[in-house]
Image (tube, rainbow, N blue to C red):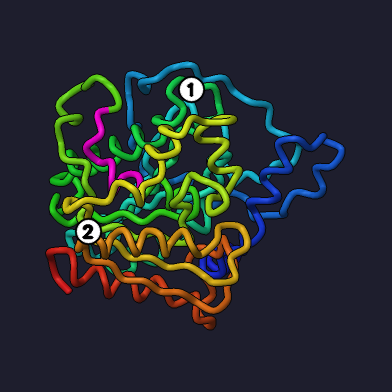
């Protein structure tokens, strides 16, 4: 148990993971030793309550499992046929909920540093945390550019549908997204009302708009040279038309209904340029929407909650303070 506690407190560094993951799809098993060495999936993830998003199967079929290279890191989930929420409950609930959307270049879902670690920090602050494992667009799904947003919308609705069960105020449901998960979070913040499938049940009538949205080193633009090329390729396919690029560039769709947004990005991020966050900031300001921006001198990409003894590791306490200004409930 002591070893597990040390791991959960320490997290791990995913810096440089985007390049490694992109390369991994074309790497032979003989080069498996080149993959990053990550800890195994912890028991706290395996033991968490699970809420399936689509008990009768998701919309937009076509899933085709992809071969996973030998020694692929277990915490980078792939072949997501059944998207779901892992639920982490606090000891002393504050009536608020947080949906955490991990990144992974739309190639995988990074559940530890952008899921388990976030849940640890935010449950300690009284939040009920729901970590989303969403469908990956390159795994055969029809309507590939829509399936992650279908899942994010459904996740928000499902959380609110179960508000009484978890002691949550439906008006106090925030979200945070990282990297490609930040793109999905920004798409949810601007496209929460997009109709992407025929309604399945009463849950689909519930509001999918987050009360507040955090975006951490997010991909915002789907257009070169600002975008992260692999995330855009996985989501949109090869040579997407201009109208699809526009549709999935969320800064172009900020309106008066976009929720307040918190942005955190490091200026030395070589995977996802800081200009992505600046684009979102400018769009929010132009629309008169609340936005707070934290730009750190260094820290790179993929650090999750970050080290507590470095400036970029202070974004989450700042995010929690910011949520106090934008969510109802105790402070």
Tell me where residue 331 appears, x and y as whole percent.
Answer: 17, 74
Q: Residue at x 54, y 52 (%)?
A: 42
Q: Residues within 10 Å of mark 2 (few under 14, many from 20)?
A: some
Q: Quadrant of the N terminus?
A: bottom right
Residue 212 placed where, x, y %? 24, 58
Residue 167 horizontal/vertical position (percent): 16, 52
**Does the magenta stretch mainly form a helix, a strand or a loop?**
helix
Q: Can see residue 93?
A: yes
Is the Cβ of the residue at disc 1 closer than 8 Å to that at disc 2? Answer: no
Secondary structure type for disc 2: loop
- The disc at residue 287 is 2
Single out the residue that lies furthest toward the right.
30
Q: Nearer the viewer, residue 213 or 109?
A: 213
Q: Residues within 10 Å of mark 1 (few under 14, many from 20)?
A: some
Q: Relative to residue 135, is residue 172 depicted above or below?
A: below
Q: Is residue 2 visible?
A: no
Q: Horizontal and vertical percent for residue 60?
A: 39, 20
Q: Which residues are magenta?
A: 186-195
Q: Give the residue number, with chain letter if any, for mark 1.
A: 141
Residue found at the far top of this picture: 62
Quadrant of the rendered image containing residue 162:
top left
């Amino acid at each position: 148990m002591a070893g597990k506690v040390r791991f959960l407190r320490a997290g791990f560094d995913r810096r440089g993971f985007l390049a490694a993951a992109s390369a991994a799809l074309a790497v032979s098993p003989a080069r498996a030793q080149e993959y990053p060495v990550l800890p195994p999936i912890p028991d706290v993830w395996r033991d968490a309550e699970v809420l399936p998003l689509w008990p009768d199967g998701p919309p937009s079929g076509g899933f085709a499992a992809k071969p996973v290279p030998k020694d692929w890191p277990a915490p980078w989930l792939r072949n997501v046929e059944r998207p779901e929420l892992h639920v982490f409950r606090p000891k002393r609930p504050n009536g608020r909920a947080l949906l955490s959307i991990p990144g992974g270049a739309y190639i995988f879902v990074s559940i530890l540093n952008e899921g388990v670690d976030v849940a640890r920090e935010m449950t300690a602050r009284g939040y009920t945390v729901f970590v989303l494992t969403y469908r990956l667009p390159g795994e055969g799904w029809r309507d590939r550019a829509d399936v992650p947003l279908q899942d994010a919308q459904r996740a928000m609705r499902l959380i609110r549908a179960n508000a009484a069960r978890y002691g949550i105020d439906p008006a106090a449901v925030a979200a945070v997204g990282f990297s490609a998960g930040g793109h999905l979070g920004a798409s949810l913040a601007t496209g929460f009302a997009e109709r992407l499938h025929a309604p399945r049940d009463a849950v689909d009538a519930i509001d999918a708009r987050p009360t507040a949205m955090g975006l951490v080193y997010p991909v915002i633009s789907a257009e070169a040279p600002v975008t992260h090329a692999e995330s855009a390729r996985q989501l949109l396919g090869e040579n997407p038309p201009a109208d699809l690029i526009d549709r999935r560039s969320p800064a172009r769709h900020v309106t008066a209904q976009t929720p307040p947004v918190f942005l955190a990005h490091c200026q030395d991020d070589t995977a996802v340029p800081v200009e992505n966050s600046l684009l979102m900031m400018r769009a929010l300001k132009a629309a008169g929407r609340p936005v707070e921006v934290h730009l750190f001198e260094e820290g790179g990409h993929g650090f999750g909650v970050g080290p507590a003894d470095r400036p970029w590791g202070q974004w989450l306490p700042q995010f929690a303070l910011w949520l106090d200004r934008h969510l109802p409930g105790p402070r």
